[in-house]
Image (tube, rainbow, N blue to C red):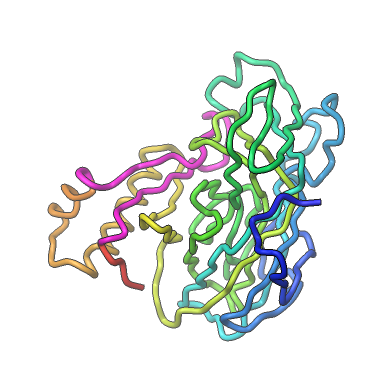
Amino acid sequence: MYFSSMIEGDGYMKLIEQSTLTFSPDHKPAGTCKPGEIVAFHSMDAFSNVLVSEKQMGSEIPLEESNPTAGPLYVEGAMPGDVLAVKILDIALEPQGVIVTCPDFGPLCDEIEERTAFVKADRGNAYFKGVSFPLNPMVGTIGTTPADGEIPCFCTGKHGGNMDCKQVKPGSTIYLPVFTEGALLQIGDLHAAMGDGEICGAAVESAGTTTVKVDVIKNTHLEWPLLETDEKWYVNACGNNYYEALTEACREMRRHLQRVTDWDKTDIFMYLSMQGDAEINASYCSSSDIPTAVRVGIPKAMNIRL
């Protein structure tokens, strides 16, 4: 049984269920699609569905065995130098998710105890310790595959990956750089609810199914993933710390604005200070090697072009 916003009767054209823990060009595709097709990705939760009791701790699961994604999906016609446009149509979640605290994750990690808690989801709300709040289903990890090498699914980068951006939700479109033939798209790490920053290092982690429409935009360069929502354009970027990540995101947003205005770099810098929003996707303790992920958003009225 799933919580879902899909209209009854909508069907899946293809279902991707193969699970992988890394983004790598060596992975055999789990399926193929043509541009414009609708595909569903069924993924386990961030702990590979291992946590079945609140007596189990998240630290029992090695980091390299966390954050599995479904895929990869080979998209016909996608080539290096293109952009993959992935519109999130629906996220269907299991009726119960899990959140944990772990050593070295989150700004208060050295002041709290390790704990696991199950969180029920019902009729659009999450229930935790007698408090209810609205669900905001989102995709934590979505990305294309690098041209060479291997990137763990718990990491983020120019390919996308574990961006933990709560705006990657039904109705939004994420634009991802393509580095290898077929793009090799992977999706997973679904969250039933998460606040900006993912403060304790986890959200309401859930297994479920993400339904997307996939398109290819030819010969368009992106340095970092670009996200389109109903109200804003966001650049998602990462770095070793907040300032480094923010610098990368602002620089990429500046490049987009240079294409649609006659402003110089200083004009754009001023505009970003007046209308840009710098938001933290996920940030971990300094002892963690996982990059800090941020997004910078501007009003949709700026009409970014790809």
Q: Is residue 279 magenta?
A: yes
- Relative to residue 233, is residue 194 drawn left or right? right
Q: Is residue 115 magenta?
A: no
Q: Where residue 190 sits in the image (x, y, percent)?
A: 66, 49
Residue under the image location 43 percent in, 44 percent down? 294
Q: Where residue 157 sits in the image (x, y, percent)?
A: 51, 54
Q: Where residue 264 sits in the image (x, y, percent)?
A: 13, 60
Q: Quadrant of the C terminus?
A: bottom left
Residue under the image location 48 percent in, 68 percent down? 177
Q: Which residues are magenta?
A: 273-301
Residue 12 visible to the viewer: yes
- Relative to residue 196, is residue 230 drawn left or right? left
Q: Quadrant of residue 72?
A: bottom right
Q: Where residue 184 sits in the image (x, y, percent)?
A: 64, 71
Residue under the image location 31 percent in, 51 percent down? 250
Query: Which residue is more in the foreground, 211 or 296?
Result: 211
**In the image, farthest residue toward the top:** 111
Label total for image = 0
Q: Where 203 sits versus 70, above or below?
A: above
